[in-house]
């Protein structure tokens, strides 16, 4: 028996909708399970991309600070930081492209 709200009389835990399998398929191969796997993979990919971008930003800031401490002008500092950011992103893309056939 599911609990009911005292005020409205509505069930707090609605019953799970009944799933009927398509002809030739079992309940375990429903699209819901596949969707969960796809969402999990997408979340991991987005997390990895965000991590690479944050790492590239940190490397660019460090390169900019080191260039400025070395006596470079502000435009030169921005150029070095931008080059470092692009290099880290390029390196990450090359590593991902190299590891893709191995991991799939």
Image (cartoon, rainbow, N blue to C red):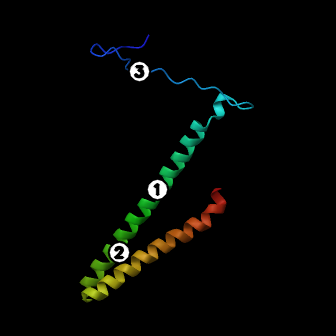
Q: Nearer the viewer, residue 26 or 73?
A: 26
Query: In this view, which residue lies farthest toward the right?
Result: 24
Looking at the rendered image, the disc whose residue lies closer to the viewer, 2 or 1, is 1
Q: Is residue 39 above or below residue 93?
A: above
Q: Residue at x 38, y 17 (%)?
A: 11
Few, some or many C-alpha atoms within 10 Å of disc 3 (few <14, some 14-19, many ≥20)? Answer: few
- Can you identify the residue that label 1 sits on? 46
Q: Is residue 47 above or below residue 81?
A: above
- Can you identify the residue that label 3 sits on? 13
Looking at the rendered image, the disc whose residue lies closer to the viewer, 3 or 1, is 3
- Location of residue 42 in the rendering, given as x and y in whole percent from the top left corner: 51, 51
- Can you identify the residue that label 2 sits on? 60
Q: Image quarter for residue 32?
A: top right
Looking at the rendered image, the disc whose residue lies closer to the viewer, 2 or 3, is 3
Q: Quadrant of the N terminus?
A: top left
Few, some or many C-alpha atoms within 10 Å of disc 2 (few <14, some 14-19, many ≥20)? Answer: many
Marks 2 and 3, the one that precedes in the sequence: 3
Badge 3 marks a residue whose secondary structure is: loop
Q: Residue at x 46, y 56 (%)?
A: 46
């Amino acid at each position: 028996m599911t609990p009911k709200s005292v005020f409205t009389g509505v069930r707090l835990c609605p019953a799970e909708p009944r799933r009927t399998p398509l002809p030739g398929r079992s309940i375990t191969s429903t699209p819901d399970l596949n969707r969960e796997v796809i969402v999990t993979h997408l979340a991991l990919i987005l997390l990895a991309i965000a991590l690479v971008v944050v790492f590239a930003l940190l490397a660019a800031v460090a390169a900019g600070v080191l260039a400025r401490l070395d006596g470079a002008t502000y435009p030169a500092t921005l150029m070095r930081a931008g080059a470092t950011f692009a290099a880290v992103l390029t390196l990450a893309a090359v590593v991902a492209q190299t590891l893709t056939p191995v991991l799939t």
